[in-house]
Image (spheres, grey):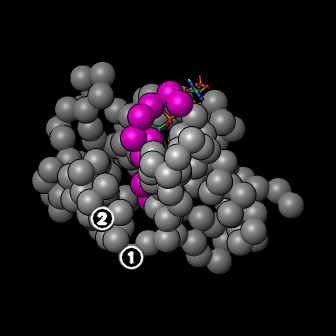
Amino acid sequence: MAEVVRDRWGDHVVMARGERIDARPLPALVAVAEDGDERVGLLTYRVDSNSLEIVTIDAFERGRGIGSALLGGVIELARMEGVWRVWLITTNDNLDAVAFYLRRGMRLVSVHQNAASWSRQVKPSIAETGHHGITVEDELELELLIYP
Ligand SMILES: CC(C)(COP(=O)(O)OP(=O)(O)OC[C@H]1O[C@@H](n2cnc3c(N)ncnc32)[C@H](O)[C@@H]1OP(=O)(O)O)[C@@H](O)C(=O)NCCC(=O)NCCS
């Protein structure tokens, strides 16, 4: 798990809203292929009294339903934990991921201006220029409210 996070996020530490989050001790969901035991995706998360935060989500191959399965699984878990909010932070360039979340009912609730630029001071491996040639500077907060 640590290797996967390091490979895909450049470090086992990920940044969100100025906080260094070590993904290694976090609980996780692992997606496994239906036709074997191959691991095809990983989602790490943490839970507090009201909410479940998705810290990382990765489909090792895109467009095969792995991200949807992980998101569905964690929402089910949030219901079992009795929390009312599932949320996450992503960077302002990650528009494909934002579209993926919005299509699945999540809402964009905040733009944390310059949060990614501040995070870069702690984690210099955060790229200056990200997807679609967009300057990586803000963090976007998305959430899904869960009703009983
Ligand atoms: C964002 C991410 C997790 C989405 O995962 P994914 O597995 O590609 O997503 P899915 O396959 O479930 O859904 C993507 C599309 O593929 C389609 N799809 C689902 N199952 C499919 C299948 N079996 N075959 C082909 N396409 C399929 C879905 O309909 C969906 O299209 P839609 O959004 O228009 O409805 C993935 O792109 C990823 O790992 N990105 C890199 C890491 C990242 O940016 N993480 C988010 C940071 S917060």
- Residue type at mark 2: give it: Ala
Q: Which residues are magenta?
A: 54-64
Q: Residue at x 46, y 61 (%)?
A: 44
Number of numbered discs on residues: 2
Can residue 2 be seen here? The reply is: yes
Residue 81 image offset from top left, x and y in percent = 71, 72
Mark 2 close to ligand 1, CB under 8 Å: no
Residue 109 visible in the displayed image: no
From the viewer's perspective, tell me whether residue 101 is left or right of residue 12. right
The image quarter in which residue 137 lies: top left
Q: Secondary structure at mark 1?
A: loop
Q: Are marks 1 and 2 in contact (CB under 8 Å)?
A: no
Task: Write the residue at 63% across / 66% down.
Answer: 51
**Amino acid type assigned to the residue bearing label 1 in the image:** Pro
Q: CA distance from mark 1 to mark 2?
A: 9 Å
Q: Residue at x 50, y 57 (%)?
A: 30
User: Seen in the image, is 118 located left or right of residue 76?
Assistant: left
Sequence-first disc among 1 and 2: 2
Q: Residue furthest top?
A: 132
- Residue 99 in the image, given as x and y percentages of width and height: 53, 29
Q: Residues within 10 Å of mark 2 (few under 14, many from 20)?
A: few
Is residue 20 placed above or below 98 in the rendered structure?
below
Q: Residue at x 35, y 63 (%)?
A: 1
Query: In front here: 1 or 93?
Result: 1
Residue that numbered label 1 is attached to: 25
SS class, disc 2:
helix
- Give the label on residue 121, or none: none
According to the picture, the residue beneath numbered tag 2 turns out to be: 2
81 on left or right of 28? right
Residue 59 point in image, percent of width and height: 44, 41
